[in-house]
Image: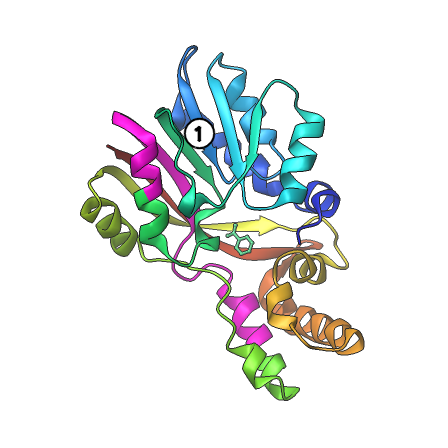
Amino acid sequence: MWEANLYRQKHGFVFDYGKDLISMLNPKAGERILDFGCGTGELTAEIAQSGAELVGIDASSEMIKAAQEQFEGINFIEARGESFIDSKQYDAIFSNATLHWILNPEAAISAMYSNLKPGGRLLLEMGGKGNVATIIETLQDVLEEHGYVQQSKTVNWYFPKLGTYSYFLEKNGFKVTFAHLYDRPTKLNDPNTGIIDWLTMFAGKYFTGIPAEDVSSIHKIVQDRVKERLYKDGHFYADYKRLRICAIK
Ligand code: BEZ
């Protein structure tokens, strides 16, 4: 279960960075646009300022509830992206920091294809190959050292290569017009607990069945161990690698 308040307060960079993607989307009044993985709705609301009609979907009921409470007049729906098929198609689909949560990429791509009008555009950004590798590899090492071998093998995300995701899009009928994999070191809010907060918010699945006191000490050891590589000028930076793609149906 995602904690919407923690997400907004300490991980607002997720939607701050997404703003840049909106200019590539270039939304227009009268268009019908789907925000695929809308979270707490900040970007959905920003896109809606163009005069486009927005629908936001997210698999988390917490996030959808928070979005509905804050942004009236936008249709927010709790739904899993890979199985959401609307009765009316869209001019464009926008997706920021969501598709790496869907472990069956072709199911998501197929759903997005069905939901777009012919000629409709897809604008997506997600974690790409090597995303948060320093944090995750360190976490896996520390889990193993503590005897949590099973947990260290957790598969939580899908971070594809540029060519792999482009291939899946093309295989499912899209024309890929732009693709870019780039480093985006991401400053974490709290100078003292940045990595611990990130693990608390996003990496809970790795800690299934682990007692709370071990969870806290593993969080702390991981943060200490990555400090040499991920701490700069008084802040921790998560080693994000983004995959940004534009495609047309
Ligand atoms: C990402 O946006 O790349 C991301 C966010 C949370 C967990 C893993 C990756």
Residue 220 at what x, y percent from top left?
73, 71
Q: Work out which quarter of the rendered image holds the N terminus and state it.
A: bottom right
Which element is circle 1 on?
Answer: strand
Q: Is mark 1 within 8 Å of ligand 1?
A: no
Start-end of magenta stretch: 111-140
Q: Is residue 6 above or below residue 149?
A: above
The answer to whether any part of residue 98 appears in the image is yes
Q: Is residue 240 magenta?
A: no
Type of amino acid under label 1: Leu
Residue 40 at what x, y percent from top left?
63, 36
Q: Is residue 208 left or right of residue 80?
A: right
Q: Nearer the viewer, residue 130 or 168?
A: 168
Q: Is residue 112 left or right of residue 144?
A: left
Q: Which residue is mark 1?
A: 34
Q: Quadrant of residue 226?
A: bottom right
Residue 92 at what x, y percent from top left?
36, 26
Q: Is residue 218 left or right of residue 87?
A: right
Q: Nearer the viewer, residue 166 or 86?
A: 86
Name the outermost residue toward the front: 87
Residue 175 at what x, y percent from top left?
20, 37
Q: Residues within 10 Å of mark 1 (few under 14, many from 20)?
A: many
Q: Is residue 15 above or below residue 209?
A: above
Residue at x 62%, y 84% (from the top left corner): 148
Q: Work out which quarter of the rendered image holds the C terminus and state it.
A: top left
Q: How many marks?
A: 1
Q: Quadrant of residue 17?
A: top right
Q: Is residue 147 above or below residue 246?
A: below
The answer to whether any part of residue 180 appears in the image is no
Residue at x 40%, y 54% (from the top left corner): 128
